[in-house]
Image (spheres, grey):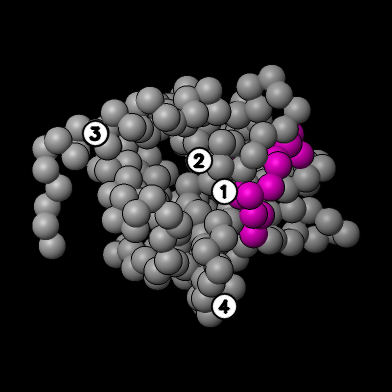
Amino acid sequence: MNKPSQGQVLNAIAILMNNADWGAISSTSLQSFIDNPRAAGSQFTAFLKYGGVEQPKVVVHIDRTSAFDPVAFIGEGWSFAEARNPRSAALGLLDYYSKVKLSTDWLEGKSSVDGETRRTRILVDTASTPLNADHFLDLWNNKEKIPEEWKKVKGVITFDGDVLRDSRGDRYILCLYWSDGRWSWYGHWLGRKWHAAYPSAVLAS
């Protein structure tokens, strides 16, 4: 494979600077891109590798250990979409969940927001840390640990420290909700609009 020349690289950077629709990108999303240079570079490399067109879907194997196993819990074709948020991973399981906040700070004054933007806002909020799939599983298996006031939530409670992916490549967040006198769960698609009925379970950092 012939490596690109320095001139080609500079031209590619100039094209990005002059032709990207910067007005369609939020400052929060751009800052997340800046704060994760290795991931950003990897994604941009993959984009250029396929000539600037949508690349074929591939199965990404992430080396990680977790009490939550997507295949065992949901079924074949499910996996973790990305590495766990580092701050969330450092939490460990909790003995009590009474200090967990059900946050809608990510709304930032709006009535709703798309799922990917919502999660980006949750992750860049250094004042709090989202619970993850292991916390979800801990509460699902030990429902007596779920705070009683969580039953008052009209929507779902989300665990944004992890993202799951189905066999089609769609991304989901695990959720708990109280309905008909019992706790239930499901995966909420990040491609949808999210509103205040979907608070995120976070712990003060």
Q: Secondary structure at mark 3?
A: helix
The numbered dot on residue 102 is none
Residue 73, image x, y percentages: 56, 73
Q: Which residue is mark 4?
A: 75
Q: Residue at x 53, y 46 (%)?
A: 160
Of mark 3 and mark 4, the one earlier in the sequence is: 3
From what the image shows, is residue 4 above or below residue 101?
below
- Observer-side mark, 3 or 4, equals 3
Q: Amino acid at mark 1?
A: Phe
Among numbered discs 2 and 3, the one appearing first in the sequence: 3
Marks 1 and 2, how far apart at CA: 6 Å
> Image point 53% across, 72% down: which residue?
167
The answer to whether marks 1 and 3 mark residues whose Cβ atoms lie closer than 8 Å is no
Q: In this picture, which residue range is highlighted in magenta?
A: 187-201
Which residue is the site of mark 1? Answer: 159
Q: Which mark is residue 130?
A: 2
Q: Give the labeled residue for mark 3.
A: 11
